[in-house]
Amino acid sequence: METDDSEKIITLLERLKTSSAPISEDEVISVLSATVESCHVPCRDAPEDVPYDATEFENVAREAEMHLCILLRLLDSINNAKKEGQKFSPQFLKCVIVGCVSVACEYRNSSWEWSNEQAAKTSRDILNKLCDLCECNNLQALLTRRQIAEDNKEDADAIRKETNDEVFEGYMKFVLEKLSESLKRSTWKSYPAVKMVYQYMLELLDHRSISIHLPYLFPPALFITDDWEKSNKVLGLSALRHILTKTPGSELRFYGRAAVIFDALKPLLYAREVEVLDELYPTILEAAKVLEADPAHAGKLRSQTCYEVILEQLLREMYGEQKLALRSLYSRTLPEVIAAMGIVALRWSQELMEIFKDYLATYDGRDAKDRINILKGINKYVQECWPQVHMKIPDIMKMLVRLAYDVTDEDSDVEPKAVHLIIQEIEVIVQLLCDAAPQTMLKACCGITAVPCHAKCKSVLERISVIVESRELK
């Protein structure tokens, strides 16, 4: 900050503290704008393809503390003047709120490389002070709803006229416009703090307010997801998922945004990073859900659905996968995909049976989480494909009996709690199979108690036999 600006700020703060004269809006805006500009996290000097680290922002937080304190003092003076009866123009409030929100949100988390505890605390104080100034309960209400008291119709009309909005929806639009100056495909990596502000603004938008801001939100989510850095991919995927879950599906389909998202995410199905895939599958399933809900698809049998694109690649990745973290992720994802597909999963019965068999027969640790998840996948398959599940009952029962034998063996080191969960899941699947095809189950389980095995497994088989026989009697 220039020396003249510093002297100007000191003079203004002293006068605001000692004088009872009305605040000059132009003078405050001039000082506030200069302070905000100096407080922003500076543009990186390093090339964009080099990840940033804490050393690049070594002195940023310390310098920001002073500027943030100045902003807080200015807001205190503005708030006090308002309590004493001074009225401020809508343009003045807009400049104050947009400037303070855009810079305070850059430092609100002390874990970020350019922030610290004191800067984060002062930032939160600034945001709280803005809420007090506009008589709002929280920042979400400040940015996304009418900010003038509803009984003050003249001020509300003034804002509508000045912003050219028929209905004033808060200051979010102006904050996003300011962010978009730096949040461009060609420059966003030079301003690492801006993407964090973008993420926070997105989180503040719910289904009632997100639609009107999509032109500002949608492009950044796509190009952040398209970045090579893992952390950026995860952030972008999280943003896309929020957009998909909070925006009406009809609107996403009408403008083609859902199809764009789905096509942008398909290449990421080949990724190998667990963190990326963990965020990817829920996001692409949401995109597929929106596309599959298109009324144009009703009553039509298509060669391939969006869900099948996901399942095909998932099964391909699951075949022969050796990395434990990925196997765990895939087994956790499979039940969700089957549930989303519904009866269309019948097309993939043979491939699913092979995956079920492979994963249930493979040791995955004492907690047996992967095998429990695969059992949940079988459960979903039986529920969704029950009209034709009788064709796969012999294969499914062989898998279940073998699993029961393995986990109850005296040499097994599977935790008792995990064994209990596995047996519970097996019994639920048996009950579902009996409901779907009682006669086939009776034939498949005929003589099951005569299978030679150890005592614990024998107990499980007897309970399965009881379930099958009781269902037949009903």
Image (cartoon, rainbow, N blue to C red):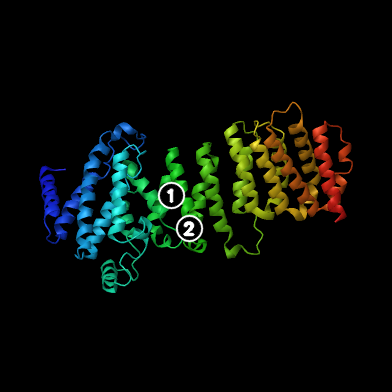
How packed is label 1: few (under 14 Cα within 10 Å), some, or many (20 or more)?
many
Q: Quadrant of residue 334?
A: top right
In the rendered image, the quadrant that contains the C terminus is: bottom right
In the rendered image, the quadrant that contains the N terminus is: top left
For image coordinates 28% across by 45% down, the residue present is: 122
311 over 59 or under it: above or below:
below
Residue that mark 2 sits on: 246
442 over 142 or under it: above or below:
above
For image coordinates 29% across by 61% down, the residue present is: 134
Sequence-earlier tag: 2 or 1 = 1
For image coordinates 28% across by 54% down, the residue present is: 129
Residue that mark 1 sits on: 222
- The answer to whether 322 appears left or right of 76 in the picture is right
Q: Position of residue 298 (x, y in %)?
A: 63, 64
For image coordinates 35% across by 40% down, the residue present is: 110
Q: Is residue 181 visible?
A: no
Q: Is residue 245 visible?
A: yes
Please state which of the two labelled residues, at mark 2 or mark 1, is closer to the viewer. Answer: 2
Q: Amino acid at mark 2?
A: Lys
Q: Secondary structure at mark 1?
A: helix
Q: Position of residue 86 (x, y in %)?
A: 19, 65
Q: Secondary structure at mark 2?
A: helix
Q: Position of residue 383 (x, y in %)?
A: 71, 53
Q: Is mark 2 in CB contact (under 8 Å) with mark 1? A: no
159 over 328 or under it: above or below:
below
- The answer to whether 43 appears left or right of 312 in the picture is left
- The answer to whether 365 appears left or right of 150 in the picture is right
What is the number of the mark on residue 37? none
Q: Amino acid at mark 1?
A: Leu
State the residue in front, 323 or 415: 415
Q: Quadrant of residue 55?
A: top left
